């Protein structure tokens, strides 16, 4: 009976689906309903189980193609997954796998609640019915997977908003590519945001710069869905929201370094970053010198 199958939750240890702990995890990201793990895993056979999240698996860049067998709702498929290829297993499907070689891979998971909310705020669709995929090549999924991995490795230098923005766009991509029913939208985003709307967003960001701002918070200022807000903001400004937010943080940090005696760690907190090292790394990326070196110029 399916109700007796092990339920595997990415928020906890993923046994029996996987035998080992991830070498990299988004546990400290602050993301809500989004999970990222990276593994360097031995060959492993997982018994039949059900994921509690919609799961994307992306084969790592290193290594040789790995032979594997997959059983989804009783249907068996054998493949030789190449680096960069992916599998997609919707939540609550009966799933088992046998990976015959050790390998490196990433797992990205969406809680059904986050997925459904993003969909219903963004598009019209008869119902959400996702189609499992094994061993396919999807360049956008691969690109987003690599960007999320880099963000986790760098300890989220731009805050939670970067990952949440990528995940929101990825949800709509998955819906368009791997759902039974195709979404429709009557939303016209060709005109972008008005100057008043943009200023409202800018004012909100400056007023809350010390916080780890969530995408949902900014979108709610204009009463828009996260997906449509991201599209409209980029259409209006030519950059993404997280790029704008990061630039605002760097500009404010430069001002504090020049005009105050705050420590570098205090300045990191004042611009919404959680630690000295992430702030220094991000500052150097944008200014081509460390905060300490910049302060010495005044």
Image (cartoon, helix red, strand yellow):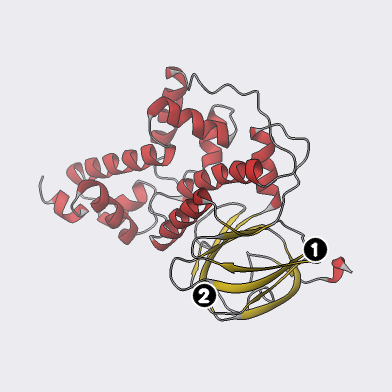
Residue 85 relative to residue 126: left or right: left
Is label 2 in a helix, a strand or a loop? strand
Label 2 Cα crowd, 10 Å radius (few <14 / some 14-19 / many 20+): many
- Would you say residue 163 is visible in this rendering? yes
Q: Nearer the viewer, residue 57 or 149?
A: 57
Label 1 Cα crowd, 10 Å radius (few <14 / some 14-19 / many 20+): some
Q: Nearer the viewer, residue 56 or 82?
A: 82
Q: Position of residue 285 (x, y in %)?
A: 26, 51
- The image quadrant where one finds the N terminus is bottom right
Q: Any mark on residue 73, and which? A: 1
Q: Nearer the viewer, residue 205 or 134?
A: 134
How many dots with numbers?
2
From the viewer's perspective, is residue 238 above or below residue 104? above
Image-quadrant location for residue 9: bottom right
Image-quadrant location for residue 14: bottom right
Label 2 – label 1 distance at C-alpha: 25 Å
From the viewer's perspective, is residue 144 above or below residue 73? above
In percent of the image, x 27 and y 56: which residue is there? 280
- Would you say residue 38 is visible in this rendering? no
Q: Where is residue 41 in the image (x, y as percent from the top left)?
A: 54, 77
Q: Where is residue 267 in the image (x, y as percent from the top left)?
A: 30, 50
In percent of the image, x 32 and y 40: which residue is there? 247
Residue 168 relative to residue 126: left or right: left
In percent of the image, x 52 and y 54: which residue is there? 30
Task: Determine which residue is flagged by label 2.
Answer: 103
Is label 1 in a helix, a strand or a loop? loop
Q: Position of residue 82 (x, y in %)?
A: 52, 65
In percent of the image, x 44 and y 65: which residue is there? 61
Image-quadrant location for residue 91: bottom right
């Amino acid at each position: 009976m399916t109700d007796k199958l092990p339920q595997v939750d990415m928020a906890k240890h993923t046994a029996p689906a996987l035998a080992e702990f991830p070498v990299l995890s988004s546990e400290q990201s602050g993301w809500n309903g989004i999970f990222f793990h990276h593994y360097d895993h031995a060959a492993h056979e997982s018994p039949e189980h059900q994921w509690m999240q919609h799961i994307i698996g992306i084969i790592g860049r290193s290594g040789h193609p790995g032979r594997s067998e997959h059983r989804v709702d009783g249907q068996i498929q054998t493949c030789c997954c190449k680096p960069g290829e992916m599998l997609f297993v919707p939540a609550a499907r009966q799933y088992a796998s046998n990976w015959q070689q050790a390998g490196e891979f990433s797992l990205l998971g969406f809680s059904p609640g986050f997925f459904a909310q993003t969909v219903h705020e963004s598009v019209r669709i008869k119902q959400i019915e996702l189609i499992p995929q094994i061993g396919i090549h999807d360049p956008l999924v691969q690109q987003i997977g690599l960007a999320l991995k880099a963000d986790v490795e760098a300890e989220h230098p731009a805050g939670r908003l970067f990952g949440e923005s990528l995940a929101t766009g990825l949800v709509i991509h998955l819906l368009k590519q791997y759902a039974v029913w195709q979404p429709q939208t009557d939303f016209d985003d060709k005109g972008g945001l008005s100057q008043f709307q943009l200023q409202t967003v800018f004012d909100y960001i400056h007023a809350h710069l010390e916080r780890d701002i969530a995408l949902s918070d900014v979108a709610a200022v204009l009463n828009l869905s996260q997906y449509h807000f991201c599209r409209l903001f980029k259409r209006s400004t030519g950059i993404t929201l997280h790029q704008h937010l990061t630039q605002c943080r760097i500009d404010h940090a430069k001002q504090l370094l020049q005009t105050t005696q705050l420590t570098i760690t205090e300045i990191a907190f004042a611009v919404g970053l959680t630690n000295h090292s992430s702030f220094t790394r991000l500052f150097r990326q944008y200014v081509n010198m460390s905060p300490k070196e910049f302060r010495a110029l005044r």
